[in-house]
């Protein structure tokens, strides 16, 4: 058993946010540099530090905890994303676009998301540790709900690893025991665990920072995506191993590994802040940043954000009091509680029993007062006109009484036909019913980018409960080989190409031309950004005007924002149908993508892409 008193908790929570701000300010200006660096001080110093999504998103999660309560679900957090955090960088954008199309978590993090295993969620772990101090399993559960909003697999493991280390650090001072707990919280075979073990093994064998960095890259390095989580998790912890007693050197050593440097520096800063407490953090690194929090207000759409690190700590602590009360602990100013950390073996068993390693990429999870719902899309969520799909529905009774009554399904979209079987529930407490929803989509006069059905439960003695089931219409093109030609190609005949996401699967090397029609369902013209990240040359025409002339790039990150300007173009969609034509000079390897966003980079959820008749 260990004692957590109020003063210790408050000092470590304040240290968390101070360290987060310092590490993010150090690493922010060199984010994306993939070579080894040699920083020994902030590249840029300003009051409040450098604004950083690593901290901004956690202000949104604090708002969620304060307004929605402690039992947050991934669906709650996805709504907070849409309402309160505007940037659409990489996985943020793709996750939010999926939610706009009705694909709720965990499917929102997995479907059509090139960045699903990157650093966007591991950097959000601290809030969950700070509201579950000394309770690593609870911190991991909250972290997992967060992660699957816009990530899957390695990113979810990475956020849980950090949340466990940070939660346990409120009680446990020993680095090696904390890292052992973190590794126990994730599967041994995952890339994140392999990266951390490669770093530790190399460090213990050589004591050499450069050798440990190389060992990580040799084991799991992904140069195409500097935000890939496993390598950056290991870089974060490498700073702790190379400089265990020197805050400044530790965050410099993490950042100097390169890659996602704002994330590595910020997270190690917060870990050390919790483990050491604010009082032990060096004034040399803290005082230049002051007490304020630097954010870009336009990015958060919140009216009541904390203005100082002290206010952020006060509000985090207020949530923690309620969180601990829910676990049976009376905590607050002047009080102390006794907590016992699990052993690594105990935590591993708890994580597995709680299903926290279950990261299926084809599921949606829902909860209601009387039970849980899991929708599984064995063939994925795509449904084209003239096609069929099915969803497996699992409903679990979490009450202490039998749930008995009819269950039915109805279509909410034109052309969608659905049938549910069986059509009655009779569930004892703890039992799960397994049903199948069959769906078919007929051509409709007003096609939609996504279609919905609704399933309703009418169990005797409970209020009726309904939940949606969504399907996404694939993008279709008509393409043909065209070895030469200038100007906008005229595509006649050709073959039909269905595109399930944004990556266009061209049949082989050569010059290909294609055409699709884009339906703008609005009565108003829409300014759009045409995004065509590609390794090979591609030209795009919108309604007869060339909008993209992209020579291609050896390395791309197919996001809404982070490629060279030649991968993007601007145009206007007229109300109704619009023509989109492309010419690809495809080399047979690499990737080519195409998608449309708003001018400021938000993915549209209602545009239909349909090939013309041949």
Image (tube, rainbow, N blue to C red):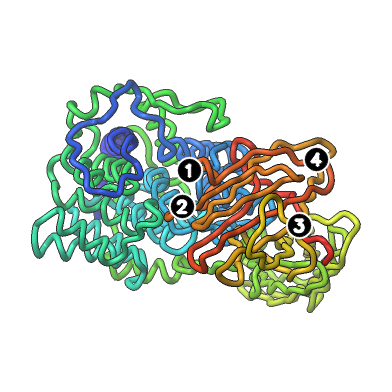
SS at mark 4 in the image: loop
Whole-number angstrom distance, CA of label 1 to CA of label 2? 9 Å
Question: Mark 2 or mark 3, which has the lower sequence index?
Answer: 3
Residue occupying image coordinates x 28% and y 35% = 26
Residue 369 percent coordinates (x, y): 66, 57
Question: Mark 1 or mark 2, which has the lower sequence index?
Answer: 2
Check contact, mark 1 vs mark 2: CB within 8 A. Answer: yes
Give the residue at the far left of this rendering: 206
Graded by Cα atoms within 10 Å as few (under 14), some (14 to 19) or many (20 or more), the crowding at tag 4 reads some
Question: Mark 2 or mark 4, which has the lower sequence index?
Answer: 2
Check contact, mark 1 vs mark 4: CB within 8 A. Answer: no
185 vs 398, nearest the viewer: 185
Name the residue beneath numbered marker 2.
553
In the drawing, what numbered circle is on residue 574? 4
Q: Which of label 4 and label 3 is nearer to you?
A: 3
Residue occupying image coordinates x 73% and y 70% = 403
Question: Mark 1 or mark 4, which has the lower sequence index?
Answer: 1
SS at mark 2 in the image: loop
Name the residue beneath numbered marker 1.
564
Question: Mark 4 or mark 3, which has the lower sequence index?
Answer: 3
Whole-number angstrom distance, CA of label 1 to CA of label 4? 27 Å
97 vs 399, nearest the viewer: 97
Residue 51 percent coordinates (x, y): 41, 30
Whole-number angstrom distance, CA of label 1 to CA of label 3? 28 Å
Q: Is residue 549 above or below residue 461?
A: above
Check contact, mark 2 vs mark 3: CB within 8 A. Answer: no
Name the residue beneath numbered marker 3.
490
Residue occupying image coordinates x 53% and y 32% = 299
Check contact, mark 2 vs mark 4: CB within 8 A. Answer: no
């Amino acid at each position: 058993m260990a004692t957590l008193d109020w003063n210790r908790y408050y000092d470590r929570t304040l240290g968390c946010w101070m360290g987060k701000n310092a590490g993010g300010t150090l690493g922010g200006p060199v984010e994306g540099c993939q070579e080894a660096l040699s920083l020994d001080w902030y590249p840029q110093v300003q009051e409040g530090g450098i604004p950083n999504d690593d901290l901004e998103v956690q202000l949104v999660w604090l708002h969620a905890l304060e307004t929605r309560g402690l039992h947050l679900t991934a669906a709650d957090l996805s709504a907070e994303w849409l309402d309160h955090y505007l940037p659409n960088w990489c996985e943020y954008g793709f996750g939010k676009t999926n939610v706009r199309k009705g694909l709720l978590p965990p499917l929102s993090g997995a479907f059509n998301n090139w960045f699903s295993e990157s650093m966007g969620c591991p950097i959000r772990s601290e809030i969950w540790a700070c509201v579950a101090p000394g309770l690593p399993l609870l911190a991991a559960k909250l972290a997992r709900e967060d992660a699957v909003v816009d990530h899957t697999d390695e990113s979810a493991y990475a956020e849980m690893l950090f949340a466990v280390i940070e939660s346990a650090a409120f009680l446990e001072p020993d680095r090696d025991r904390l890292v052992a707990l973190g590794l126990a919280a994730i599967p041994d075979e995952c890339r994140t665990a392999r990266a951390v073990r490669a770093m530790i093994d190399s460090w213990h064998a050589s004591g050499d920072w450069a050798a440990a960095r190389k060992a990580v890259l040799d084991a799991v390095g992904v140069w195409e995506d500097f935000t890939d989580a496993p390598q950056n998790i290991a870089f974060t912890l490498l700073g702790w191993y190379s400089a265990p007693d020197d805050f400044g050197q530790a965050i410099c050593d993490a950042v100097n590994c390169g890659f996602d440097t704002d994330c590595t520096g910020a997270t190690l800063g917060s870990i050390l802040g919790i483990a050491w407490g604010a009082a032990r953090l060096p004034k040399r690194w803290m005082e230049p940043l002051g007490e304020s929090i630097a954010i870009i207000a336009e990015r958060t759409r919140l009216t009541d954000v904390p203005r100082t690190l002290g206010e952020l700590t006060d509000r985090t602590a207020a949530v923690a009091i309620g969180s601990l009360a829910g676990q049976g602990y009376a905590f607050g100013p002047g009080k102390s509680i006794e907590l016992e950390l699990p052993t690594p073996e105990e935590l591993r068993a708890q994580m597995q029993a709680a299903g926290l390693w279950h990261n299926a990429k084809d599921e949606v999870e829902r909860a209601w007062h009387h039970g849980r719902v899991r929708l599984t899309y064995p063939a994925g969520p795509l449904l084209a006109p003239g096609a069929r799909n099915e969803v497996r529905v699992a409903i679990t009774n979490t009450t202490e009484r039998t749930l008995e009554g009819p269950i039915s399904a109805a279509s909410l979209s034109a052309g969608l036909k659905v049938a549910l079987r069986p059509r009655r529930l009779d569930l004892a407490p703890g039992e799960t019913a397994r049903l199948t929803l069959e769906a078919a989509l007929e051509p409709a006069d007003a096609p939609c980018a996504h279609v919905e059905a609704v399933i309703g439960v009418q169990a005797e003695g409970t209020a009726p409960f309904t939940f949606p089931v969504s399907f996404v219409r694939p993008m279709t093109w008509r393409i043909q080989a065209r070895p030469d030609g200038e100007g906008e190609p005229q595509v006649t005949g050709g073959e039909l190409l269905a595109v399930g996401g944004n990556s266009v699967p061209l049949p082989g090397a050569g010059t290909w031309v294609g055409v699709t029609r884009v339906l703008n369902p609005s009565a108003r013209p829409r300014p759009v950004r045409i995004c065509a990240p590609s390794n090979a040359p591609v030209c795009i025409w919108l309604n007869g005007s060339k909008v993209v002339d992209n020579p291609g790039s050896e390395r791309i990150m197919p996001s809404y924002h982070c490629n060279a300007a030649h991968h993007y173009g601007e145009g206007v969609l007229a109300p109704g149908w619009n023509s989109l034509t492309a010419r690809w000079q495809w080399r047979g390897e690499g990737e080519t993508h195409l998608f449309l966003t708003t001018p400021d980079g938000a993915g549209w959820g209602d545009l239909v892409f349909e090939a013309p008749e041949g």
